[in-house]
Image: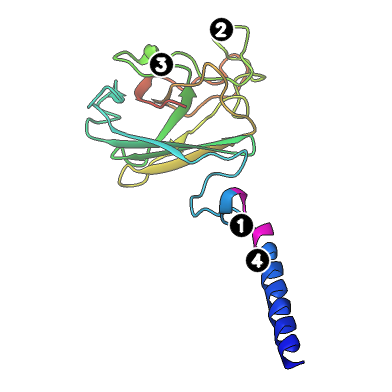
Amino acid sequence: MRHIQRVLGIVTFAGVLVAATACASSTSGPAGAPSAAPASSSASSPAPGHTEPKQVSGTFGSGPVAYTYDKALVPDGAKVSVSEQVNDGRTTVKLDVHGLKPNRTYGAHVHAKPCGPKGDDAGPHYQNMPDPVKPSVDPRYANPKNEIWLDFTTDAKGDAVQESTVDWTFGVPSAGSVVIHADKTKTEPGQAGMAGARLACISVPF
């Protein structure tokens, strides 16, 4: 009797062992691969509709990134930085300048083309909805919602920071630069968008 009970115990233990092995196999991948688990990664990426900030810096008078066309108002050696960020279909452009004339107001806008040796090389203002009439001086097109205006006033050291946010993103072809002008940007019909002479320019691949 004891011999029969011992045999039955061995058979029962073997059955339990087989069942446990089968259960473990059912959670493994093909050919004994580890069981599937949610993927995880420490790498971060921008959320949909967002981009990492883009930034370009330069020194006026050094070219070919930053040009100055009026060294009295934008001296050689003055510093400039432009950044761009897109969030949920909105674009923010920030302009940071150092070493310009102190306590002075300048106009500034995003322009359609990269800078060149001449101020006109940057082309017209970039417009989200292009004005069919050139030059664009119609407030329906030449305004800070359809263009990116960055007018600023320097402090006692000649430094300033300005930013503009618009409810659109750059198209194709994109914009190519930020131009600093001699005067505050006008808004009245027939002169809208005008801001005097082009003093300096920094190329930015928007």
Q: Are marks 1 and 3 in contact (CB under 8 Å)?
A: no
Q: Determine if the magenta segment contains residue 28.
A: yes
- Which residue corresponds to the image point at 30% horizontal and 46% vertical from the top-left? 157
Residues under numbered marks 2 and 3 in contact, where contact means CB atoms less than 8 Å apart? no
Using residue 34 as the reference point, say whether residue 16 is left or right of it.
right
Could you tell me residue 93's position as x and y percent?
50, 36
Q: Are marks 4 and 2 in contact (CB under 8 Å)?
A: no
Query: Closer to the N terminus: mark 1 or mark 3?
Result: 1
Specify which label sits upstream in the sequence, 2 or 3.
Answer: 3
The type of residue carrying mark 4 is Thr
Question: Which residue is more in the foreground, 56 or 47?
Answer: 47
Three-letter code for the amino acid on which mark 3 is drawn: Ala
Mark-to-mark CA distance, 3 and 4: 73 Å
Residue 21, labelled with which disc? 4
Of mark 4 and mark 2, the one earlier in the sequence is: 4
Question: Looking at the picture, does residue 63 appear above or below residue 34?
Answer: above
**Magenta stretch, residue numbers:** 24-30
Looking at the rendered structure, the secondary structure element under dot 4 is helix
Q: Position of residue 121 (x, y in %)?
A: 38, 12
Q: CA distance from mark 4 to mark 2?
A: 80 Å
| Badge number at residue 35 | 1
Task: Report the residue at 49% width, 41% height from top.
Answer: 52
Disc 1 to disc 4, how far (Cα)? 14 Å
